[in-house]
Amino acid sequence: MNVAVIGVGRVGLPLALFLESLGMKVTGIDRDAGMLAQLRKKTMPFHEEGCAELLAESSIRFTDSIADARESDYIIITVGTPLYNHIEADLGSVRAVCTELIPILRPGQMVILRSTVAPETTLYIRQFLEMHTGLVVGRDFGLGFCPERLAENHALKELRQLPQIIGTEDDRSRDMAKALFKRFSVRLFFTNYLSAELVKLFNNISRYLDYAVANQFAIIANQYQQNIYDIIHMANEDYPRGFIFSPGFTAGTCLRKDFGLLNERTATPDLLLSAWKINEHMPFHLVEALTRYVPLYDKKVAVLGYTFKKNSDDTRDSLVPKLVRYIERHVPKSITLCEPNLDRSVIDGYPNAGLEECLADADVVFVAMNHDHFVYHNALLKIQKAAWVVDIWNALGQNQFIFRKDMIDLVPRDDIETGLRQPPAYPVEAVRMLKAVSE
């Protein structure tokens, strides 16, 4: 079985390596010359658990020519599907691939779209290919939408575990897709194009909504001067109905934009648009909340983390750059980053230092991402005594959204029965005490 994977990025490359591990002959196609050069040297262009080992032994042919998919039985498309800035699906990459398929598509092949797409995109591809090739889906070639639903750094594991959704609308396409995906040894669900497209969008958007609720609760708790972490702990503990997520930055190339693939067809404000507004507001909220206690003007600021998710090296659609821009508006003396997952001395114009160097003389510390690195290397102990800390993730384990390191012990901790700290007294009594200490 010969398979061509068009787009060997964070979705396509793990899939290509996994398919090869199942005994298939794989061609990896991408237009990124730098990435292809790395892959030909057996070097992973990004971190993905288990992929480096497979790549080291791989015989995949990596090429920049879609024409090299001519002899493949299956052509799997995994290119990006971003949004335009005005909430509109950008089909440019998908259309470009289909345009290059026109002269090489032949009877007997199957095209599988695996990118996250707006509803009816598979129908668009069907009509586009049929119009320009003269071939007919179901008679001459197969077509299906089979979404990936993988978490970064867990792709290979989840390819072996997660059910595969197969959206087809004719027997030939269904049978061809089944022949491929049955090799995954997971459960298969068969449906039509549109339902398969909605499965992927609903999976992502439901998570986005959950995190928006958590972030809205964090904002409300701060307004009432209450501790969001203790509230969530008490609300969830041994309670059988519902679960409240913890707050944090909700971003990335899926969660941050997938709502728009549905929302572009809605003329009025709705729940999805509101969730986007809440999650996008969080960088501003962190900066604004801190400045109730201390101005950022002329301060040395440390920002821990720059990627879009925990323990990742992926900065695409991260909210941390947005956080840094809001910090910049207050004219700090300096901003230093610590992103241990990126081997760069400078990121977007800011120095990327080791943890100790980043924290050595920082007046303010934003824990922008909850990387394990910061916990394992005792970031809290490396923060100078009088520094202010903003920790939306509670990564440092202090159960406080904003605190000054030398004030930690002033927070009451006498709730023996529940084992929880009492909510901190910010921003009234504690601020009065802090002013007295600083004066």
Image: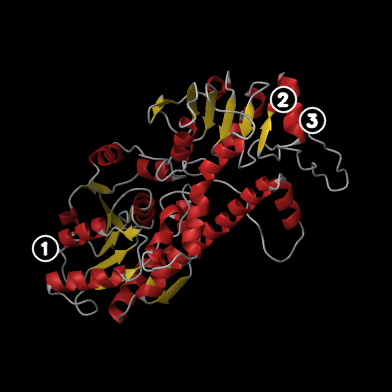
Circle nearer the viewer, 3 or 1: 3
Q: Residue at x 16, y 61 (%)?
A: 99
Q: Earlier in the sequence, mark 3 or mark 2?
A: 3
Q: Quadrant of the N terminus?
A: bottom left
Q: Is residue 431 left or right of residue 199?
A: right
The local crowd at label 3, few if under 14, some if 14 to 19, many if 20 or more residues have their Cα within 10 Å, is: few
Q: Which residue is mark 3?
A: 410
Q: Label 1 amino acid? A: Pro
Closest to the observer: 150 or 197?
Answer: 197
Relative image position of residue 350 (x, y in whole percent): 42, 26
Numbered tag placed on residue 103 in the rendering: 1
* Cα distance between the residues tagged 3 and 2: 14 Å
Q: Which residue is mark 2?
A: 435
Q: Are marks 3 and 1 in contact (CB under 8 Å)?
A: no
Dot 1: what SS? loop
Q: Residue at x 54, y 60 (%)?
A: 209
Q: Is residue 439 left or right of residue 331?
A: right
Numbered tag placed on residue 343 in the rendering: none
Closest to the observer: 42 or 397?
Answer: 397
In the rendered image, the vertical position of residue 182 relative to residue 403, given as above or below:
below
Dot 3: what SS? helix
In the rendered image, the vertical position of residue 374 relative to residue 214, given as above or below:
above
In the rendered image, the vertical position of residue 19 relative to residue 404, given as above or below:
below
The local crowd at label 1, few if under 14, some if 14 to 19, many if 20 or more residues have their Cα within 10 Å, is: few
Give the mark count.
3
Circle nearer the viewer, 2 or 1: 2
Q: Is residue 80 left or right of residue 342?
A: left
Q: Label 3 amino acid? A: Leu
Q: Are marks 3 and 2 in contact (CB under 8 Å)?
A: no
Give the quadrant of residue 164: bottom left
Q: Residue at x 12, y 74 (%)?
A: 134
Dot 2: what SS? helix
